[in-house]
Amino acid sequence: MAYVLHQLLTESATRRPDAEAVRLLDQALTYAELEKLSNQLAHALIEIGVVPGDRIGIYLHKSPAAIASIFGVMKTGACYVPVDPNAPGLRLAEIARQCGFRALITSSLLYEKLSGAFSNECSMAAIFFIDKSPDTALPAPAVTFADSLPSQPVASPAVNVIDQDLAYILFTSGSTGSPKGVMLSHLNALTFVNWACDTFAICGTDRLSSHAPFNFDLSVFDIFAAIKAGAAISLVPEGLSSFPVQLSSFIQDQGITVWYSVPMVLTMLSTRGKLHERDLSRLRLVLFAGEVFPIKHLRNLRRMLPEPRMANLYGPTETNVCTWYEVGQIPENQTTPVPIGKACANMAVMAIDEAGRPVLAPGKEGLLYVRGSNVMQGYYGRPSESAACFISNPFASGRDEKLYCTGDWVTIDDKGDFLLIGRKDHMIKTRGYRVELGEIEAVMVA
C-alpha cells in the first residue's frame, strides 16, 4: 500500500510497465518510461543539492515531461510548487521568493518571457530546462534534460519520505495582495485520492481527462487517481476550452471515460459543444467542482448525458475535496443548485452557527468546518494566518482537536445534505479560481 504519492507511480510501473500513462496529442509515455524519466530527474536534482523539504518550482505548460517533473521532484523528498505558465513573470518571482525555490523546472520559451523577473540575488542552485537552454543571462546554472538525464541512474533514489512530508504547495489569491501557498502533505492528498478511486471505481482501463492546470487543485485527482489505478491521463491541450466543438471532439477521439472540470466548461460543452453529434459511449463518469453549477445548465447537461455517473465535489484548496453529492435526474421545477452533499470517507464536516451550536436540522445556518487527514498543513511562511483558519473543536471532549474553517455558510436539507449559501469574507470564485478582492485592490492602488 502506497503511503506517499510517488509510490503510486512505482507500483503501477511494476504492474503495468507497457501501459500508456500519459498523453498529449502525439506525445506519450508508458508507465515504464514515466518511472524511468522521473527517477533520472530525481537523481539530477539530488546531484545539484536538492534535499528533502526543499521547494522546487514547476513553470511548464502541460506535457508528459511536466508529469515526469512532478514525480521526479517528490522522489527527492522535496515538494513541487506548480506555477501557472500563463501568469505574469512577476507572480512566479513572488512565489519563488516566498518559497525559496531550490531549483526551477521550465522551458526555454517560457523562461524568455520572464523578462528579468528574477533578481541577481536569486538563490536557486539550478534552472532545469525540458528542452534547450535559452540564449539569455540566467541567475543560476542551466541544466537541460537532454544533457543531464541520460547519464543518471534509472532506479528510484533511496530517499526516506514519509506521509506527513510536504508533497506540493498550491498558491491561491491572498487578501493582502500577495499570493499565499497552501501546504499539502502526501497524506493530505492520498486521503482524497484513495477515497476517489474507491468511490468512483477508477481502474486500469480508464482514461482520465486532465483539464485543470497543475496549479489548480482539481489536477490532484486527474494525475494521482489515474496513476494509482494504472489508468491513462489525457492532457487537454491548453486553450481548447475556448472551442467547445473541438473539445467535445477531443473527448470522443481520446476515448475519455472520466471527465473532471469546473462547471463553466461543462456548460459550454452542453450549450455549444454539439454533444449530440458525438459518440461518448465510453464516458462513464462526469465530475465537477470549483464553483456553483447553475441548475438550468446542469439539467441540460444531465439530459444530454443521461448514462454517466455525475457528481458535485466540494472543498477548498486547503482540504481538497471534503464533501460530495451524486447527481441524478433533475426535476423541471427545481430552481436551486444541487447540494454539496455529505462528507467523504475518512473526513468529517460540521456546520456551527453563530451561537456555537451544531447545525443539525433544516432551516438553520452555520459556517462549515472540516477535520481529517485531508486538511492542509498551513500556509507557507504564514503561521499567524494558518492559526487563524483553525478553531478548537468545541465538541471534542478532552482532546485538543482542530477544525478548519472553510469560510462558507451552509444549511442542511431533510436528507442530511449540506447546501451552500455563500461566503463570510471578500473571496469570490470565477471559473473555479479563488479571487481575494483585497489582492485586486492592492494591485490597483500600488
Image (tube, rainbow, N blue to C red):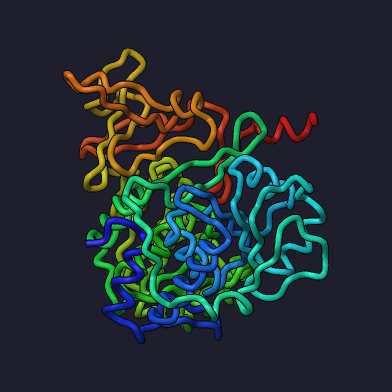
Q: Residue furthest top?
A: 355
Res 205 seen here: yes
Q: Residue at coordinates 59% horizontally, 52% vertically from top-left?
A: 102
Q: Nearer the viewer, residue 422 or 332?
A: 422
Looking at the picture, how far across and down is residue 9, in whole percent? Answer: 35, 69
Looking at the picture, how far across and down is residue 58, in whole percent? Answer: 58, 59
Task: Indicate whether 313 appears above or below 401.
Answer: below
Q: Residue at coordinates 67% horizontally, 33% vertically from top-left?
A: 177
Quarter of the image with the C terminus in it: top right
Task: Indicate whether 65 appears above or below 223.
Answer: below
Res 333 seen here: no
Q: Nearer the viewer, residue 431 or 126?
A: 126
Q: Nearer the viewer, residue 415 or 124?
A: 124
Q: Quadrant of residue 140?
A: bottom right
Q: Residue at coordinates 70% horizontally, 35% vertically from top-left?
A: 440
Looking at the picture, how far across and down is residue 167, in whole percent? Answer: 42, 52
Looking at the picture, how far across and down is residue 411, in whole percent? Answer: 33, 30
Label tally: 0
Say left or right for 57 vs 16.
right
Quarter of the image with the N terminus in it: bottom left
Q: Residue at coordinates 21% horizontally, 39% vertically from top-left?
A: 415
Task: Indicate whether 15 appears above or below 167.
Answer: below
Say left or right for 264 vs 61.
left
